[in-house]
Image (cartoon, helix red, strand yellow):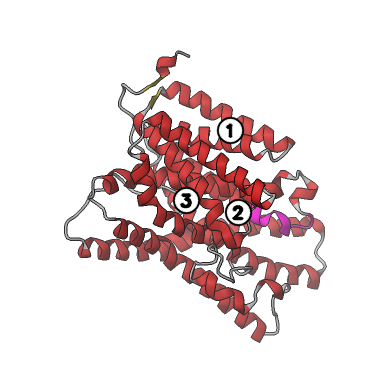
Amino acid sequence: MAWTSVSTRNETLPISRGGWLDALRFIVAALIILHHFQGAGPIALAESVHPMFERSGFLLTNFFLIDSGYVLMRVYGAALGRGALSPGNFVLKRLLRVWPAHLIMGLALVAMVVLGTAAGAPPRNPEWFQWDQLPAQLALVQAFGIPGGLGWNAPTWSISALIGCYLAFPWVLRGLTRLGPWSILALGLGGYLLANQLCWALLDYPVYQMPLRYGFFRALPLFVLGMALAGFAQKVWIDPRLARWAGIGAAVALFVIQLVDKQALASLACIAVIILAAGAIPTPRPSKWVEKAAQVSFSMFITNEVVRIAWFGVANVAIARFDLPVAAQWGLWGLGIVAAVAFAFAFHFGIDNPIQTRIRAWLKARSPRPVRLGGPVISLEG
């Protein structure tokens, strides 16, 4: 395909709902649920099927963080750049998007533990429900070196880390907007490689193995890489045919790589290509089904660990009491995944979306003048 398939002379596509970016959102959320549930069956999938079911956690987290930077850059970058949206209001919007749902699920988990213990059914692994770990997690500060945050709804460390990324977003944006598209891309890629090399030199492990209590330092290079991909995509037109083939090729390569080994840097390159390709493919007929599924992805992320704990707390008692055969145990495991997805849909439409509707109305009322931000945010966190 000719070099003219990548050009700065053509107008780039705006991102839209109901297309490949939304589809990626839902797919990644579903795979995160599978990863969190993989060890809860009669035999862990990492042992009975393939090790990639265990090591996919870092990969999906990387995807989540890069995608967040990419979409927020494309949705809010222009408004922040021209002063139509203040940094303070941007951070407030993002905090109010993630914290209410997180707090509800955190308190629900506390209620489960307290009521279960009172009823004579305490957690089977009490070390994951230590009370001194809870305050930092509920406040979403566990990714900044503040003691606490282990156990409970543990995957929310990445939401905590993203709050730091939200705070950094306006400052990173200011630097990126002064550069040309290829310089932006080089800065994003180079910044991640530099962070990774520094971790190896100073700590003797890669950046993606940074302890969760320092999750912000793990997340920021990936988030900035996503912003850089978006800055590139906003200035460089990519032929949709090239984008489709590149996206398919990168997805196949990513799968094959995971069959062989983790290969973190190669996997990261594939993720970057997939996200770039998804943003460059037009959506002439947006799918309402895909859009609705994508809207539930944040609820899938924030609720699945709580559902897993509740479901298998009951299932394990039933398995032991009735001496259920392995086939029935696998049936309960599969139903648990279905329950996690179903609960996420119910939580989104029954709780999270109504709360966000009220928050959006309040934010609009307090704003001195309405600001159109170019469309709804379609990253995993909302």
Q: What's the CA distance linking mark 3 and mark 1?
A: 19 Å
Please state which amino acid type lies under the numbered disc 3: Leu
Q: In the rendered view, does 128 fall on the left or right side of 296?
A: right
Q: Residues within 10 Å of mark 1 (few under 14, many from 20)?
A: some
Task: Look at the image and tell me in which quarter the C terminus lies.
Answer: bottom left
Q: Which residues are magenta?
A: 35-43
- For image coordinates 48% across by 14% down, the residue present is 1
Question: What secondary structure is the stretch in magenta mostly built from?
Answer: helix
Q: Which of the two labelled residues, at mark 2 and mark 1, occupies the earlier sequence position?
A: 2
**N-terminal of the two: label 3 or label 1?**
1
Residue under pointer 2 = 33
- Dot 2 amino acid type: Ile
What residue is shown with label 3? 380
Res 201 label: none
Name which residue lies at 21% across and 61% down. 367
Residue 176 placed where, x, y %?
37, 40
Image x and y of residue 18, in percent: 40, 41
Q: Are marks 3 and 2 in contact (CB under 8 Å)?
A: no
